[in-house]
Amino acid sequence: MNNLYSIQRMRRLRKTEKLRELFQETHLSLNDICLPIFVEEELKDYQEISSMPCIFRIPEKRLAYEIERIAKSGIKSVMTFGVSHHLDEIGSDTWKEDGLVARILRICKDTVPEIIVMSDTCFCEYTSHGHCGVLYDNIIDNDTTIHNLGLQAVTAASAGADFIAPSASMDGHVAAIRQALDNAGFIDTAIMSYSTKFASALYAPFRDAAGSCLIGNRKTYQMNPMNRREAIHESLIDINEGADAIMVKPAGTYLDIIRDLRERTELPLGAYQVSGEYAQIKFASMAGAINETLVILETLGSIKRAGADIIFTYFALQLAENKILPLR
């Protein structure tokens, strides 16, 4: 066939595996990954979460073993969630020096000092009503809650947290936490804000994992999933309040928001592949409908390609221990 014009043959760069690797634009490694973990006090043995196959609540007494295992796999950071048996209306256990938040962090840092520990800073696992702050007449008291978030943040920093990660979605929470940390002398403790957190149906398995007793919903303080401009505004507010890094949650259904924020800020940008995203892949794999490993890598790759620097994913340990992702 005689071509009268030049054809751009994209297949020239795809002919072999080595060529495809050479010209691959987006790469994943364990440097990009943070593992969320659930730690329950007074739990006798590991408890599998039925809606999240292969994910377990870790007994507090086994946490040191698990942190060593996680670190040996090559994972460099964890996000800690506590499952408390000491609930009250305001989540006061979170700012006690001997409370679950502090104990988890001390165990992590005493066991593997170099591991980066991000302390989820919220109240939903510690309140009797399951909301993320103080309730008065079934309405969240924003300003009392951000004061209490400051108390929790200082306790977490005292126990060794490298990052305070506020997920309560309260107005002004980053500024309140930054002021509380600085006043307590923790000027080098960083804030990874859940700066754009949507009121998503994809959180349902997480609520099983965390033992949530939520009454009602969180739509008054989490974001409407249909709002793109507001999503950007939310994160820009947290940046202006002093966040050191920001996050979009969930990740896979909000790649447009990740890209929007990547174009608006030079701050480190996280994205949380949430429990529902994890469950969809796991159950589809169990049904034989997909190749699990390939889909995991494709979904994580799309999150990084959209602009995320760090991805919070429940697949982290699976990827690390099976050496699916390189160390660097």
Image (cartoon, rainbow, N blue to C red):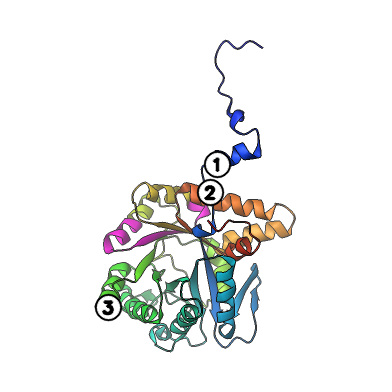
Residue 127 seen in this snapshot: no
Q: CA distance from mark 2 to mark 1?
A: 7 Å
Res. 11 image quadrant = top right
Provide the secondary structure element on which disc 1 rests.
loop
Residues shaded magenta: 234-254
Rendered location of residue 258, percent (x, y): 43, 51
Identity of the amino acid at label 2?
Answer: His
Q: Residues within 10 Å of mark 2 (few under 14, many from 20)?
A: some
Provide the secondary structure element on which disc 2 rests.
loop
Q: CA distance from mark 2 to mark 3?
A: 38 Å
Residue at which label 3 appears: 185
* The one of 258 and 138 positioned closer to us in this rendering: 258
Nearer-N-terminus badge (1/3): 1
Nearer-N-terminus badge (2/3): 2
| Quadrant holding the N terminus | top right
Residue at which label 2 appears: 27
